[in-house]
């Protein structure tokens, strides 16, 4: 199973469309918030067989998206949130604790526009960064690919978009 994880596209979806073209096909797309109202278009871009999970970001005004989700990925449970309610700009400790309290071994968030991957107290905490307004050194638009192998192990790969647009 191939999973694309993105966040913080902020209605500038040219880079998301490029990534989808480069990595297709994907079995699941996870958008961690701040898509700013393009839920319907994103659904059209991924195709009917792709599972789509999206959560509400702090800039998703007037959206009916859920604030948080818990999903299964193989034998894993993932907690999805934009992250601003957990103060992820300061530290991911509260987010990891919340995921663990819910029985999740993965916590995914956005909000900071910076890629992040770390295991905290048995919880894999990840942020794909931003495809539209990256804030890490080098400011390259980023996303994450997860591959679920036949043994049920997840493999995480941080990726950067080549030929990107701001």
Image (cartoon, grey):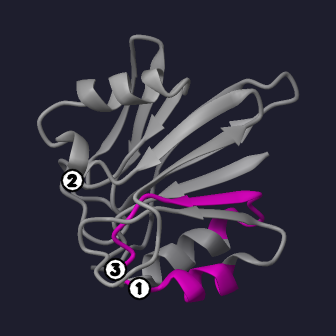
Q: Residue at x 15, y 43 (%)?
A: 89
Distance from the alpha carbon under mark 3 to that under mark 2: 14 Å
Residue 53 higher or lower than 39, as above or below: above
Distance from the alpha carbon under mark 2 to that under mark 1: 28 Å
96 displayed left or right of 55:
left
- Quadrant of the rendered image containing residue 98: top left
**Residue numbers of the magenta segment:** 22-45
Query: Which numbered circle lies on residue 165?
Result: 3
- Dot 2, how many residues are within 10 Å of its Cα: few (below 14), some (14-19), or many (20+)? few
Is residue 59 located in the magenta-colored stretch of the structure?
A: no
21 displayed left or right of 95:
right
Image location (x, y in percent) of residue 116: 34, 37
Q: Between disc 3 and disc 1, whose residue precedes?
A: 1
Image location (x, y in percent) of residue 91: 18, 30
Residue 126 higher or lower than 134, as above or below: above
Image location (x, y in percent) of residue 46: 70, 75
**Between residues 107 and 138, which one lies in front from this camera angle?**
107
The secondary structure type at the circle numbered 1 is: loop
**Between residues 33 and 21, which one lies in front from this camera angle?**
33
Residue tagged 2: 138
Q: Residue at x 58, y 80 (%)?
A: 42
The secondary structure type at the circle numbered 3 is: loop
Image location (x, y in percent) of residue 92: 25, 30
Q: Nearer the viewer, mark 3 or mark 1?
A: 1
Distance from the alpha carbon under mark 3 to that under mark 1: 20 Å
Query: Which numbered circle lies on residue 37?
Result: 1
- Dot 1, how many residues are within 10 Å of its Cα: few (below 14), some (14-19), or many (20+)? some
């Amino acid at each position: 199973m191939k999973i694309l994880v993105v966040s913080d596209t902020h209605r500038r979806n040219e880079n998301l469309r490029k990534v989808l073209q480069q990595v297709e096909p994907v079995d699941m797309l996870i958008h961690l918030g701040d898509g700013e109202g393009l839920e319907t278009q994103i659904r059209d871009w991924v195709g009917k067989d792709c599972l789509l999970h999206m959560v509400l970001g702090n800039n998703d005004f007037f959206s009916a998206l859920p604030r948080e989700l818990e999903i299964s990925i193989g034998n894993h449970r993932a907690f999805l949130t934009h992250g601003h309610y957990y103060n992820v700009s300061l530290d991911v400790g509260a987010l990891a604790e919340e995921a663990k309290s819910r029985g999740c071994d993965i916590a995914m968030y956005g909000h900071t526009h910076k890629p992040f991957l770390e295991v905290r107290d048995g919880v894999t905490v990840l942020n794909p960064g931003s495809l539209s307004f990256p804030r890490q050194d080098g400011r390259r638009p980023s996303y994450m690919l997860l591959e679920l192998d036949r043994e049920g192990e997840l493999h995480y790969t941080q990726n950067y978009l080549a030929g990107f647009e701001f």
